Amino acid sequence: MNLPIVNMGLNRPLPVEVTDVTQPFWAGLCEGHFLVPRCRACGRLSFPPRQVCPECHQREFDWHPVSGRGKLYSATKVHSSPAIYGILSPFRVAIVDLAEGVRIVTRLLPDGRSPALDSHVELVITRHPDGYHYATRMLK
Ligand SMILES: [Zn+2]
């Protein structure tokens, strides 16, 4: 299932660091998928991508596309940020529990509403002039 794409007018605030560990994730975003590593030994899904499973410490992973659906666990509004994020300020950062049981930290796109905890949210892929990233937004 491809995630919705939201066009953003600005470049990503920070350049994306693509490594051997994260390359499949970034490649997935370009194809419309938010992929999370799934440990081949214990099956645990986790995010962000890392070299070692946080559950069993094995190092072999498959990549699992998530639905993008989740609930808002927490959110905060950032008014004062490092200069590199200044053009975005103020902005919201959210902790989202995905339906697949993975907790992620991401930007919450503004829609004029105040976010309520446990609100249903969806992941979106953000398309910037310099590439892709991701964020979440509240469902209507
Ligand atoms: Zn594991």
Image (spheres, rainbow, N blue to C red):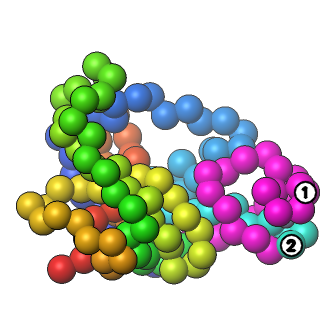
**Residue 134 appears at what percent x and percent y?**
39, 53
Specify whether tag 1 is near ligand 1 (CB below 8 Å).
yes
Main SS of the magenta part reads loop
In the image, is 52 to the left or to the right of 92?
Answer: right
- In front: 84, or 132? 84
Residue 41 got which mark?
none
Specify whether tag 2 is near ligand 1 (CB below 8 Å).
yes
Please give the range of residues in magenta: 43-65
Q: Secondary structure at mark 1?
A: loop
Residue drawn 33% across the image and 23% down it: 82
Q: Is residue 88 above or below residue 75?
A: above
Residue 42 got which mark?
2
The quarter of the picture showing ligand 1: bottom right
Outermost residue, top side: 83
Give the quadrant of the C terminus.
Answer: bottom left
Q: Quadrant of residue 89?
A: top left
**Residue 103 appears at what percent x and percent y?**
55, 64
**Residue 52 appears at what percent x and percent y?**
82, 50
Residue drawn 44% across the image and 59% down it: 95
Residue type of the residue flagged with mark 1: Gln
Residue type of the residue flagged with mark 2: Cys
Residue drawn 51% across the image and 80% down it: 99
Q: Earlier in the sequence, mark 1 or mark 2?
A: 2
Pointer 1 residue: 58
Residue drawn 62% across the image and 57% down it: 47
In the image, is 22 to the left or to the right of 97?
Answer: right
Q: Is residue 14 above or below residue 41?
A: above
- Can residue 109 be found in the magenta stretch? no
Q: Secondary structure at mark 2?
A: loop
- Tell me if residue 122 can be seen: no
- Separation of marks 1 and 2 at Cα, in angstroms: 9 Å
